[in-house]
Image: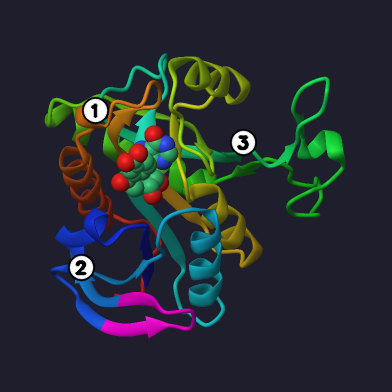
Amino acid sequence: MIALFAAMEFEARQLTGRLTPAGTLPGRFPLYRGRLAGRRVELVLTGPGKANAAAAAASYLASSAANACLLFGCGGAYAGSGLQIGDLALAESEILLDEGSDSPDGFLDLRQLGLPLLPEEPPLFNRIPLDDRLFRFGRERLRPFAAKTGRAFAGGPFVTVSTCTGTDRQGETRARASDGICENMEGGALALTARRYRIPLLELRGISNLAGRRERQNWDLPKAMEIAQQAVLHLLETWPGDDDD
Ligand SMILES: O=C(O)c1cccc(C(=O)CC[C@H]2O[C@@H](n3cnc4c(=O)[nH]cnc43)[C@H](O)[C@@H]2O)c1
């Protein structure tokens, strides 16, 4: 069984409309259940931001039979990623970019502070790797899928922030500091929690905006939501190693 996660109800509506509402998880996170592309799935709506995402993932994974997680939604593309609105991005890792401390000499990240998010060996600081096997599967499947629909595709580091980018300068600084291609508000929290529970995670996002100067009138959430949900269905068709169906 595959666990799907999305932040906002409007980001998942095409999929939840094909599933059955199954009440709420502890913490009042909406849960849906059913089959998509022939696979048994459960879908959790986390709400926006890291705090919600970590709480929802922990609430779900503490007592679930899922053998993989797939997080999907919208994201903002950094300049230099080659991505435009309506394109598709896949996470190779998640960077919790604003966890750390300011100082008179500039920002200090968690490694510099000696504060690992996960004290495994080697310890994980701001960067959480995602499951490599699922990432390679996703990349192989989504590159031709995006091309067929006339969209660009990129795989690479994603950046999770509490405060969305609002100026071009901030976007450039964040992209340079992280090597990231796409910004969001939940991925790092899901990546950390899934890793704590030892469940592999894949994350994809449709690009709704450019992570630069905030010009809300130029965002296209419907276009991003459409490609992201279509991509989820495309991946589920051939999802690897899911033999409980
Ligand atoms: O109106 C706004 O300024 C605004 C800012 C961030 C997100 C929204 C949404 O309605 C989308 C929710 C969802 O999308 C992700 N997202 C999309 N673009 C970005 C971004 O440039 N930076 C960070 N997150 C982004 C995020 O994961 C939200 O949960 C509206």
- Look at the picture and state if 88 lies above or below 34: above
Q: Earlier in the sequence, mark 1 or mark 2?
A: 2
Location of the C terminus (image quadrant): bottom left
Measured as percent of width and height from the top left, residue 40 is found at 28, 73
Within the magenta stretch, is there residue 69?
A: no
Q: Report the residue at 54% width, 44% height from top.
A: 162
Mark number displayed over residue 85: 1
Q: Residue beneath label 3, please?
A: 97
Could you tell me the amino acid type at mark 1? Ile
Per the image, the residue denoted by label 2 is 16
| Residues at marks 1 and 3, CA–CA distance in whole angstroms | 23 Å
Q: Is residue 180 above or below residue 98?
A: above
Mark linked to residue 238: none
Name the residue located 55 percent from the left edge and 62 percent from the top edge. 54
The 10 Å Cα crowd at callout 3, few under 14, some 14 to 19, many 20 or more, is: many
Tell me the CA gap for discs 1 and 2.
Answer: 24 Å
Q: Is mark 1 within 8 Å of ligand 1?
A: no
Which is more toward the observer, 160 or 179?
160
Question: Callout 1 environment at 10 Å: few (<14), some (14 to 19), or many (20+)?
Answer: many
Q: Name the quadrant where ligand 1 sits.
A: top left
Q: Give the magenta part as a residue range.
A: 22-31
